[in-house]
Amino acid sequence: MQLIDPNVSLVREAVPIRVEMVVRGYLTGSMWRGYAQGERAFSGLTVGEGLHKNQAFAQPIVTPTTKEKSDRPISPADLVSEGWTTATLYEQMEQTALQLFRRGTQRLAEKGLLLVDTKYEFGLIDEQLILIDEIHTPDSSRFWQADDYAQNPADAAQIDKEYIRQWMLANLIDGDYPHSLPPHIVYEASRRYQQIYTTVTGNVLHVDESMPIETRIRQNLQQAGFI
């Protein structure tokens, strides 16, 4: 992978496996909402009684979904029987996802963050399984401040896109999500993303506003010899 511009990367094209490997370290988000309504089976995995919001699992669990117009939870057996992947590839994806989650958990813990849950996507290049798409970003992952969670686990502040999701859930229009976000929500989401970038990398995210993004991209593509 080669970075051509902050908005452009040169990559190899993979054959995507249309499955999202969702790894969860805590009972929260959509899983908690289902659990609170009485659900106990998630993607073929049964969760026990008596759990609490934001409670940590003894070990991270994998709850895969299909990747289609409307993603749906699905068991590993059904993924195979419906032809989404093979049993061998699923096992490789599951083991790799758990390894990545453990590594991400360790690295983020060094920054005072908890990796709550995330999703990984995989594909094939020359029949070899590879990771595709983003990894451990606020779009694909949920983060909590470790000290905040220790003091108030049920209401730990989130610094990821759950902020946007909760606003949309609270502002449905005739049962549907809004098609746009008000400026103050956009601003706050941007602030949160920049905050976690700084926390994880130790750097400040600099946004080049000296020229329009399209102009900058064109110049960088020209300099790299692509246009």
Image (tube, rainbow, N blue to C red):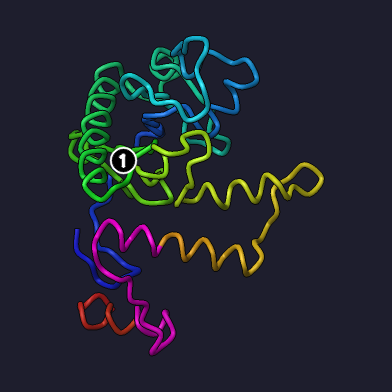
In the rendered structure, does residue 209 fall within the stretch colored magenta? yes
Residue shown at 77%/41% (left/top)? Answer: 175
Q: Position of residue 106 (x, y in %)?
A: 21, 39
Q: Quadrant of the N terminus?
A: bottom left
Q: Quadrant of the C terminus?
A: bottom left
Reply above or below: 118 against 180.
Answer: above
Q: Position of residue 169 (x, y in %)?
A: 67, 44
Instruction: Determine whether the residue tagged by mark 1 lies in a helix, strand or loop.
Output: strand
In the rendered structure, does residue 213 fall within the stretch colored magenta? yes
Q: Residues within 10 Å of mark 1 (few under 14, many from 20)?
A: some
Reply above or below: 221 against 150.
Answer: below
Q: Nearer the viewer, residue 96 or 224?
A: 96
Residue sitting at the far right? 174
Q: Is residue 7 left or right of residue 162?
A: left
Locate residue 122: give its quadrant.
top left
Q: Position of residue 222 (x, y in %)?
A: 26, 82
Residue sitting at the far front? 151
Residue shown at 34%/38% (left/top)? Answer: 120
Q: Nearer the viewer, residue 63 or 36?
A: 36
- Residue range (magenta): 194-217
Reply above or below: 120 against 31.
Answer: below
Report which residue position mark 1 lands on: 15
Q: Position of residue 63 (x, y in %)?
A: 42, 24
Reply above or below: 88 against 68.
Answer: above
Query: Is residue 57 in view from this perspective?
Result: yes
Locate residue 94: give its quadrant.
top left
Residue sitting at the far bottom? 210
